[in-house]
Amino acid sequence: MFELRQLDYFRAVAEFGSISRAAAALHLTQPTLSRQIAQLEKNLGYKLLRRTPTGTKLTVVGEGLRTHLLSIFELVDRVPEVLQSASAGGHLVHLGVPSGVPHGWIEQYLASVAAVAPEIRFAIVEATSEEQRRMLNTGLLDLSLMHTEPPELHAEMLFRQRLGCVFREDTLPVDRTEIDVTDLAGLRVMAHSSKGEEISLRSLAAASGTQVGWLFRAFSEHSELIAKSSGVDAVLIGSASARKWFPDWPWLPLNDQRPEHWMRTWVAWANTDTKYNDVLLDCMRETARVHRTDPTYVADA
């Protein structure tokens, strides 16, 4: 049987790419670390590392274990937080939140839960929808807000937000409060991905004969820096993200009212048997219902 510390040793070797460098970081001698890795390989029945003249390489099995350990050690790292919450009589919920969800929406949801179940504590994890999908499947998250619907999980759409574009001052359409896809003709436009709403907008542009220079980048905290360094004229983005990441760039909404051209947000979860599942979901639905009365960014789902 293997020990958790042996997995930690393997993780260090995988990270440093060298037994000698990993041993130094772990404050072990190189022979001691080598014996521990050899014992782990013996216990598992697989070779995890290949020695090379420049260090070590992971075998296919070793790479699979390294990926799996990401989830295991994330759970281990959370033990103190879970114990602290439990000792105070509370229940800790890990909530995933992607970029683009209005800040006021999250605050309202937390307040709604606190009003009916004050013992619930939240650990909010900011991650992309795809990252959250992995974390839900591996038990690292209890509940997620996602911009794509995960087919293998339980999910319910909460609300839609108008998409639009932020513009550089010199490319901003004149005297407009809304834009049409044809206003993007000849512009270099950055979008978050080539999936979902972006696909339908690209199809709409192509159908109208509008030539747009699309550039796809994953962005959040450094969005403006990425946009400027890429030399784009505009960025396809929701209003909440625009206010956060592009405060000095004017934002105009797209005037297309078709549901597939709005940014959608789902709540997703994997475990249906948790004690607080109904409370968490009912508060989600109520928060979405209240915010649907705000026409500036949220539409009725």
Image (cartoon, rainbow, N blue to C red):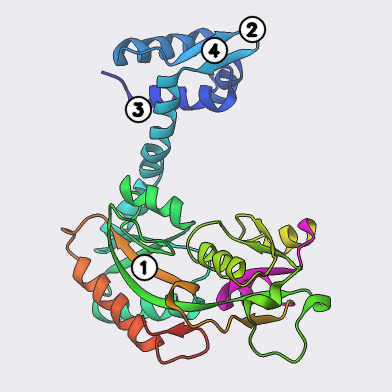
Mark 3 and mark 2: Cα distance apart in space: 29 Å
Secondary structure under tag 2 reads loop
**Mark 2 or 4, which is nearer the eye?**
2
Range of residues picked out in magenta: 230-248
Q: Nearer the viewer, residue 169 or 82?
A: 169
Mark 4 and mark 1: Cα distance apart in space: 50 Å
**First-in-chain label (2 vs 4):** 4
Of the residues shown, which amino acid type is indicated by label 3?
Leu
Mark 1 is surrounded, within 10 Å at the Cα level, by few (under 14), some (14 to 19) or many (20 or more) other residues, namely many
Secondary structure under tag 4 reads loop
Give the vertical position of 190 relative to 164 (above or below).
Answer: above
Q: Please tell me whether residue 243 belongs to the stretch shown in magenta.
A: yes
**First-in-chain label (1 vs 3):** 3
Can you see residue 113? Answer: no
Q: Are marks 1 and 3 in contact (CB under 8 Å)?
A: no
Of the residues shown, which amino acid type is indicated by label 4?
Thr
The image's mark for residue 29 is 4
- Disc 3 marks which residue? 4
Q: Please tell me whether residue 231 belongs to the stretch shown in magenta.
A: yes
The quarter of the picture where the N terminus appears is: top left
The image's mark for residue 266 is 1
**First-in-chain label (2 vs 1):** 2
Residue 35 x/y as whole percent:
43, 9
Mark 2 and mark 4: Cα distance apart in space: 20 Å
**Mark 1 or 3, which is nearer the eye?**
1
Of the residues shown, which amino acid type is indicated by label 2?
Pro
Can you see residue 119? Answer: yes
Q: Is residue 102 left or right of residue 271?
A: right
Mark 1 and mark 3: Cα distance apart in space: 36 Å
> Residue 241, located in which quarter of the rendered image?
bottom right
